[in-house]
């Protein structure tokens, strides 16, 4: 199952790295919907059930956001569900909390108007997933988590340069 998980993780990761370079929020969210479907399958086959639940709720979050229906109430409900399910399903101690932290942070910040700040949130969340994926031996995903950090940092530099601010 670990081979299947890594293949699915590779496909999801390629999509994820591409999403890090997208500066249009609506297009970014659409690409991430595809990514989440692949990651859910990858993490489920790896036995990473907390990550599977968090990513399933993240998929729902992105679908709601894509339809312009995400408000603070919906975000808090999703974060609450992430917390409840993570605590109920987590059998991996601190490792099972990492997806909860990343998923909750990203859910709370997804509708940031400032794309530079949003990209910084993406960098933090991608790094958290890097740590998680290394622990679960989903090495293809971990490699691309770092790729997403790099493409997001590149995107931040591009956005800052076009704004005329120092990086």
Image (spheres, rainbow, N blue to C red):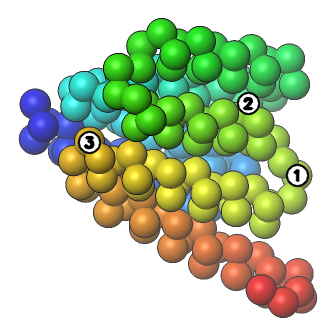
Q: Which residue is mark 1?
A: 113
Q: Which residue is mark 2?
A: 65
Inspect this view and state whether residue 24 appears: no
Q: Which residue is mark 3?
A: 136
Instruction: Point out the frontmost of discs 3 and 1.
Output: 3
Q: CA distance from mark 3 to mark 1?
A: 34 Å
For residue 140, side relative to residue 77 (left or right):
left
Q: CA distance from mark 2 to mark 1?
A: 13 Å
Q: Earlier in the sequence, mark 2 or mark 1?
A: 2
Residue 152 is situated, as x and y percent measured from the top left of the image, at 59, 68
Above or below: residue 114 compared with residue 25: below
Dividing the image into 4 quarters, which one contains the N terminus?
Answer: top left
| Residue depicted at x 70% and y 81% | 157
Residue 38 is situated, as x and y percent measured from the top left of the image, at 35, 35
Label 3 environment density (alpha carbons within 10 Å; few <14, some 14–19, many ≥20): some
Residue 153 is situated, as x and y percent measured from the top left of the image, at 61, 74
Q: CA distance from mark 3 to mark 2?
A: 29 Å
Q: Quadrant of residue 106?
A: top right
Helix, strand or loop at label 1? It is loop
Residue 100 is situated, as x and y percent measured from the top left of the image, at 56, 32
Instruction: Point out the frontmost of discs 3 and 2.
Output: 3
Could you tell me how many numbered marks the image carries? Answer: 3
Helix, strand or loop at label 3? It is loop
Q: Quadrant of residue 156?
A: bottom right
């Amino acid at each position: 199952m670990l081979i299947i998980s890594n293949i699915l993780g590779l496909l999801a990761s390629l999509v994820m790295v591409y999403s890090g370079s997208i500066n249009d929020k609506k297009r970014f969210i659409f690409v991430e919907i595809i990514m989440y479907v692949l990651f859910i399958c990858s993490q489920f086959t790896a036995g990473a059930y907390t990550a599977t639940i968090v990513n399933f709720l993240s998929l729902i979050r992105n679908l709601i956001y894509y339809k312009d229906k995400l408000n603070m109430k919906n975000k808090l409900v999703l974060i609450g569900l992430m917390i409840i399910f993570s605590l109920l399903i987590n059998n991996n101690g601190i490792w099972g909390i990492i997806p909860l932290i990343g998923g909750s942070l990203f859910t709370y910040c997804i509708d940031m108007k400032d794309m530079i700040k949003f990209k910084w949130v993406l960098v933090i969340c991608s790094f958290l997933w890097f740590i998680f994926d290394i622990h679960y031996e989903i090495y293809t995903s971990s490699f691309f988590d770092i790729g997403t950090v790099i493409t997001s940092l590149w995107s931040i530099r591009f956005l800052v340069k076009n704004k005329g601010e120092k990086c």
